[in-house]
Amino acid sequence: MIKKHILLASLALLSLYSCKKDEDEGQKIREMTEVIPENDRAIQAYLKSHYCELDGEGKVVLGSMEGHSDKTSLWDSPELKRKVIKVPDQHGNYIENTMYYLLLREGTGEQATVADNSFVLYKVQSLGGKVYDDGSHFAQRNWLDLLGAEANAYRGGTVVGFREAVALLKASASTSLTEERDGSLVYPTDSGIGVFFMPSGLTYYTGTTSIPAYSPLLFEINLVKTKRYDHDGDGIPSIEEIRHHQDGTITFPDCNGNNKVDYLDANPCR
Ligand SMILES: [Ca+2]
Ligand SMILES: [Ca+2]
């Protein structure tokens, strides 16, 4: 089981182009300008034909509108939000990707940032309901370094969409997780929970060994705890040493000009 957990956990840590399956097979990578509108249409169709609720135990329930005329579709929900995030295509042109999301439970604790070390429970599936990665029953190994230490916003850490999604949530206000005698954890009931619908540009564009290329994905994320990460241990949280822009892009200042970016450089500015 442990090995499986490690394999699954690593999925969220893959970068956008880390697995260039198409290229490896000698095929051309499809244009993001063509794929992303396709993904958007598929996501919109899903939102119009499904509803989403949180049950009494904090579990996300997604269902078809068929036979549920009493429910409100995700598309018609006043709570449905959008965030436009820019990611570079294979030519280096920045393409707008729209993430649709619904915050199902507002956490009572701290709001996360894209440079946090976060303890999350999550589930990744296709719009058709195929589950690729169910981390929702993990124990301690769900701590994820959202940004990573590669000084490249699109490599290392977690995929862009995941990082941006977590940063929209608030964690639980409780200070510790309770551990049962069998090692399982009792999760707080005040953590932030959301569902996020992501075009492939925000996740695994060219696919992974399990996720097909160009697939829009649905993420359920429960942010249990979050800590400001200090990658270089200089006492300044990484989020204060990078520039995270509204469109999801990140720039990396290097205040002393030694070619080591601030959040990975413990040397002072002067
Ligand atoms: Ca630092
Ligand atoms: Ca530096």
Image (spheres, rainbow, N blue to C red):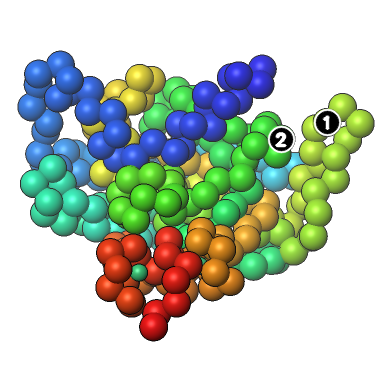
Q: 107 or 179, which is in the foreground?
A: 179
Residue drawn at the location 33% of the way across and 77% of the way down:
255
Quickly name the residue at label 1: 183
Q: Disc 2 versus disc 1: distance between alpha carbons?
A: 8 Å
Q: Earlier in the sequence, mark 2 or mark 1?
A: 2
The quadrant the N terminus occupies is: top right
Residue type beneath disc 1 = Gly
Crowding at dot 1, Cα within 10 Å, few <14 / some 14-19 / many 20+, comes out as few
Crowding at dot 2, Cα within 10 Å, few <14 / some 14-19 / many 20+, comes out as some
Residue type beneath disc 2 = Ala
Q: CB atoms at circles 2 and 1 under 8 Å apart?
A: yes
Residue 164, image x and y in percent?
A: 42, 56
Question: Residue 48 vs residue 191: left or right?
Answer: left
Residue drawn at the location 59% of the way across and 33% of the way down:
135
Q: 156 or 45, which is in the foreground?
A: 156
Question: Residue 141 vs residue 263: left or right?
Answer: right
Quickly name the residue at label 2: 139
